[in-house]
Amino acid sequence: MGLIKNDGYTSEKLGITIPQAYARLISVSLDCNGNANAMFNIHQNREDTVEKSPVDQVYINTKVDKNLPIYEQIYIVAKEKIFGGWEDDIVTDIIEEVEEVEDIIEETVEE
């Protein structure tokens, strides 16, 4: 699961703008006081997360409730504070898959 930005991303570190960016949560650490430290890697696309170095790294520190899903809480805070306007990758994938299945069904019915 990650976040996608389709309207350009500027890397302060490299001083470049890429047309699309993909943010992926890489690591999370928790302390005994309920603080979470998370690191997101920013790549040009999902495929680059496997073999290429990130364009940027973004860190977030937030208070979390240990009784609720930690990753979900971090994504919500990250989207509000850092990744506003970015799309959830998992939702995009599901929509594309549903549309493909609908197309196949439609083609089958027409035959």
Image (cartoon, rainbow, N blue to C red):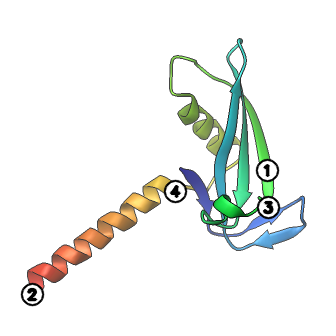
Q: Quadrant of residue 13?
A: bottom right
Circles 4 and 2: CB distance less than 8 Å? no
- Give amino acid for label 2: Glu
| Image coordinates for residue 32, horizontal then vertical, percent | 70, 12
| Image coordinates for residue 7, horizontal then vertical, percent | 66, 69
Q: Earlier in the sequence, mark 3 or mark 2?
A: 3
Tag nearer the camera, 3 or 4: 3
Q: Against 17, is 56 above or below?
A: above
Query: What is the CA distance from the residue labelled 4 to the residue labelled 2?
Result: 34 Å
Query: What is the CA distance from the residue labelled 3 to the residue labelled 2?
Result: 48 Å
- Give amino acid for label 4: Asp
Q: Quadrant of residue 29?
A: top right
Circles 1 and 3: CB distance less than 8 Å? no
- Is 30 in front, or is 68? 30
Callout 1 crowding tier (Cα within 10 Å): few <14, some 14–19, many ≥20: some
Query: What is the CA distance from the residue labelled 1 to the residue labelled 3?
Result: 7 Å
Q: Residue furthest front?
A: 51
Q: Residue furthest bottom?
A: 111
- Give amino acid for label 3: Val
Q: According to the image, label 1 marks what residue? A: 57
Query: What is the CA distance from the residue labelled 4 to the residue labelled 1?
Result: 18 Å
Callout 4 crowding tier (Cα within 10 Å): few <14, some 14–19, many ≥20: some
Residue at the (53%, 50%) spot, across then down: 1
Q: According to the image, label 3 marks what residue? A: 55
Q: According to the image, label 2 marks what residue? A: 111
| Image coordinates for residue 64, horizontal then vertical, percent | 63, 22
Query: What is the CA distance from the residue labelled 1 to the residue labelled 2?
Result: 50 Å
